Amino acid sequence: MNKHIIVQKYGGSSVANIDRIKTVAKRILSSKKKNNGIVVIVSALGDTTDELEDLAFSITKNPPEREMDMLMSTGEQISCALLAMAIKAQGHDAISFTGTQVGIRTDKSHTKARIESISARRIRKALSENKIVIVAGFQGINKDDDITTLGRGGSDLSAVALAQTLKAKVCEIYTNVNGIYTTDPRIVKQAQKIKTITFDEMLEMASLGAQVMQVRSIEVAKRFNIPIHVRSSFSKEEGTMIVKKTSKLEEIVVQGVTSSKSEAKITICAVPDQPGIAAKIFTEISKTGANVDIIVQNVSHTRHTDISFTVPKKGLSKAFAAAKKIAKKIKAGEVHQDKNIARISIIGSGMRSHHGIAAKMFQTLAKNKINIEMIATSEISISCIINSVQAIKAVKALHKAFQLEKRK
């Protein structure tokens, strides 16, 4: 790691208006006094991304993805140019770049491109001239020289990828919260800030509903062991460090509780209990592009069984149509969909070596009269699908049961 370079990323809320942009400029200059090189990645101002998306959908229900990338990438260009101006106005030289200008090369997937390489030649040159470098996040360029974007939360990925390319000392993610919490503080007031969390735990939390960081950015940070400091733009207090391993002698059993309402459930009834039937069903579903997650198949006593599975709500209509089509083909029964579900999860690397965690989770939900519809487990997480109406009640109950409010 280069001890002289720090990469900082500021989210949309951090640069939501001119006053906040000026405040961020001051913060960057304060960091510059302590470090030789500062590279800053910025998101679009406030709700700009949503507003641009609304403009596109007001013209057509199916805007072309290439043109969406052209449109959406402009939000970050505005914020990085304004921030460079604010830093210059406060007396230090700065230069802004688009993703294209710093050589962020991606594959051809519009709206969710993957980074293939970064040259960063212009960044290194600017740093050698003692300039503060501001880069527009969330974007790159493909082999056809078309602008691409990296998906929602893609500025996190831009920051981590640049930290890796520049061998930076640390990647600081500035947001509107003070760090990673044991659960959403808006749901549980007693939620505690987690001082240190592992990449594995953060990956689980991000993929299971915690919205502080983009999953792909954590994957890159883990692969290249890039320490990430998640902290508030509006406070000077320390945030949460995301690292490979924590220094604690005993791993904390449960680090946090997450909830997500982004999935829906599809059930195919009276499926013939024959070899190869599941393969036929999920081959058909996969053609829609929907990511199937939890799958539950009931035990068959009548040579017929029910199969339930979850898909992202965004892909529900296509997946449901495909499920009805394959159900007819294999002579199954009715097909049902349920949008009113929530996934409640507990996460912690200490769960690997502790027994009874699942039992405690199920007992807590039972005690609160919360019915479990589906269950999924990994080495460091347990998830339950429940009725979405009971999501908040479940989060509060589990947070209390595992005494997360006492975490210091």
Image (cartoon, grey):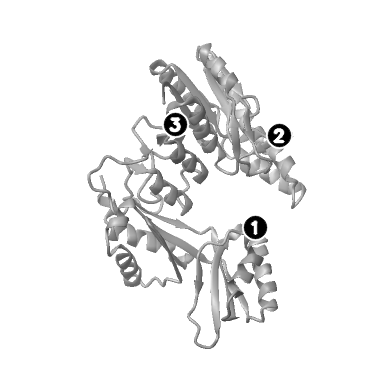
SS type, badge 2: loop
Q: Residues within 10 Å of mark 2 (few under 14, many from 20)?
A: few
Q: Nearer the viewer, mark 1 or mark 2?
A: 2
SS type, badge 3: strand
Q: Which residue corresponds to the image point at 33% horizontal and 49% vertical from the top-left?
A: 191
Q: Which residue is mark 3?
A: 171
Q: Is residue 322 visible?
A: yes
Is 365 in front, or is 245? 245
**Looking at the picture, how far across and down is residue 3, in whole percent?**
39, 22
As displayed, is residue 184 above or below residue 145? Answer: below
As displayed, is residue 397 above or below residue 135? Answer: below
Q: Which residue is mark 1?
A: 289
Q: Residues within 10 Å of mark 1 (few under 14, many from 20)?
A: few
Q: Quadrant of residue 83?
A: top right
Residue 143's disc is: 2
**Looking at the picture, how far across and down is residue 18, in whole percent?**
55, 27
Question: Looking at the picture, which amino acid does disc 2 mark?
Answer: Lys
